[in-house]
Image: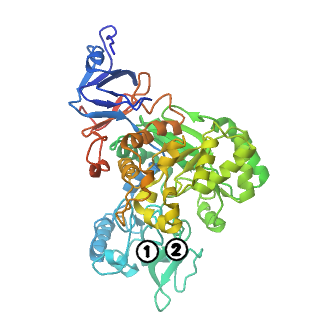
Amino acid sequence: MMAVAIDGAGDDVVMRGGRVLTMDARSSVASALAFAGGRLTAVGSDAGVSARIGKRTRVIELRGRTVMPGMIDGHAHMDREGLKSLLPSLSGCGSIAELVERVRRIAAATPPGQWIVTMPLGEPPEYLWSPDMYAEGRLPCREDLDRATAAHPVLIRCAWGHWPGRVPTVSIANSAALRLAGIGPDPVSPSPRLRIETDAAGLPTGRLYEDDLQPLAEFTVFRQAPHFTEDERALTLASSMSAYNRYGTTGVFEGHGAAPELIRAYRAARGRRAPSVRTRLVFSPGWSGASDDDVRAWVREQASRLHGKGEGDEWLRLEGLFAELQTQPDDARLRASCAPRTGWAGFRYDCGLPPERLRLLLEEAARAGLRVCGIQAGMAERFAEVGERVPIDGLRWVVAHPATLDARQIGAIRDHGMVVTTHTGAYVWRRAAATLQRVGPAGEETICPIRSLLEAGVPVSLATDNVPISLWPCVWHAVARIDRDTGAVIAPGQRIDRMQALRCATVHGAWLCLDETDRGALEAGKQADLLVLRDNPLDVELARLSQLEADMTWVGGRQVYPGGDA
């Protein structure tokens, strides 16, 4: 490829002397690229691209480094990462004594009477806990936290249950917090899934256990404790984006749905500074008390703004809707009663509908040409049933992180033009052995069946679910398929090669976002969203594949990680 600099100015940036994984239709490999005005102008040989160098061109000598398209996280919950910085951490405490001292120091810097709310017990990103994690062989209780401070209500918030991926989760409060929560002797819980532990005398120990992955205590008994505000959400989004940029993520799709408070926070953040991650939000409706007529009216009123690519621009768009089957409606109403606050979720808790009303919503959405996102294989079944009555081909309905899919389900997903986002962190790395025990040897190849989906022609986007935030472990999961607990390879027939995994993290992510003509591959005319790596992900030692970090990340022709010159 040969090109000439225009009027002597040249392009904004030329990178040369490396290995450029273009992810184009032929998976071509080049050695150089150039971009100007936020878009790629040339991808090819060093000699050809060097001809675009002008007086104002920044030339980056890659010296053998690898360049690839920016990665797109298909189910990111990116906003949560910045929110974690708002709460004091208890990470690294090896004993209750250390934890008490940590809380005492926090209290010393906090005005008396003000709530102290901390991050959960355990270590990020999963926040797993057990009594033996502390030297004393037990969990802290209210008396321990009382020793830290009696002048502040203290709450150790429970984890968002999908981080550890198991129940119960646990929160712990001191006596002052229990009093404000109205928790006294022989307390009555607002839900059978929330257990307020008491001692032999019927007095609360301060420990509350939740048999649900989505928290209840913070929206019920601890409702008075501080919640994340919209302004805090907006202010922390920049740090969330920077954290994802570090690993080469330049785009996210939030298919679990966004509540109004999160949408407003994204819009406020968009107005404050240039974003460094392209974000696609899906609307999360709340259905408390909704009738069939309400569902029809909602679709009729929202269709024009959520149709197709929805509303927004190349950096932030709101499109389509999230839908799910209603489960545990009483608990959902308890959580939703704290609206607009949603805690870690960022989506509405009352987004589920009973079966017939859900079918109505899906059919109305299909008729209106709206995109719908759902979670797990059960929603794929419902999508397919609707598709038999009202065509959904071309709408790219999304099935998020199904644990298992059989050949029949994969065929239905293909036939109705659906897209799949994976959760390899849960269903390959953390829980594959447990899933195998459930489905049995005959069903092993149905577990997170990425290869079968790809062979059927279904686009598959890799996703972190914020546990952790890097897509590189997901790439490794898809290639190696090792279960963490047993070390065994689970569903070996579903292994894919490295290039396929990288295409899932780039090309298929762009397809998921309806942006395949604009990004996902390094081709002239597309957005200059890319990352530079010191290692080549196609041949780096397999064990290191999950640990890769970007040397540089660029979005829209702007270097967003790290700051300053390369």
Q: Residue at x 52, y 72 (%)?
A: 211
- Checking the image for residue 34, the label placed there is none
Residue type for callout 1: Ala
Residue farthest along the top direction in this orientation: 7
Residue farthest along the left direction in this orientation: 63
* Disc nearest the viewer among 2 and 1: 1
Residue farthest along the front direction in this orientation: 442
Task: Indicate the secondary structure of the residue bearing disc 1.
Answer: strand
Q: Residue at x 37, y 81 (%)?
A: 143
Residue farthest along the bottom direction in this orientation: 201
CA–CA distance between discs 2 and 1?
A: 10 Å
Q: Residue at x 54, y 86 (%)?
A: 186
Residue type for callout 2: Ala
Query: Mark 1 highlights which residue?
Result: 173
Quadrant of the rendered image containing residue 38: top left
Local crowd at mark 2 within 10 Å, few (<14), some, or many (≥20)?
some
Task: Indicate the secondary structure of the residue bearing disc 2.
Answer: loop
Residue 226 image point, x, y percent: 47, 62
Residue 69 image point, x, y percent: 38, 34
Number of marks in the rendered image: 2
Quadrant where the N terminus lies?
A: top left
Please indicate, yes or no, whether residue 75 appears anywhere in the rendered image. Answer: no
Would you say the residues marked 2 and 1 are in contact, meaning their CB atoms lie under 8 Å apart? yes
Residue 255 image point, x, y percent: 54, 47
Query: Mark 2 highlights which residue?
Result: 181
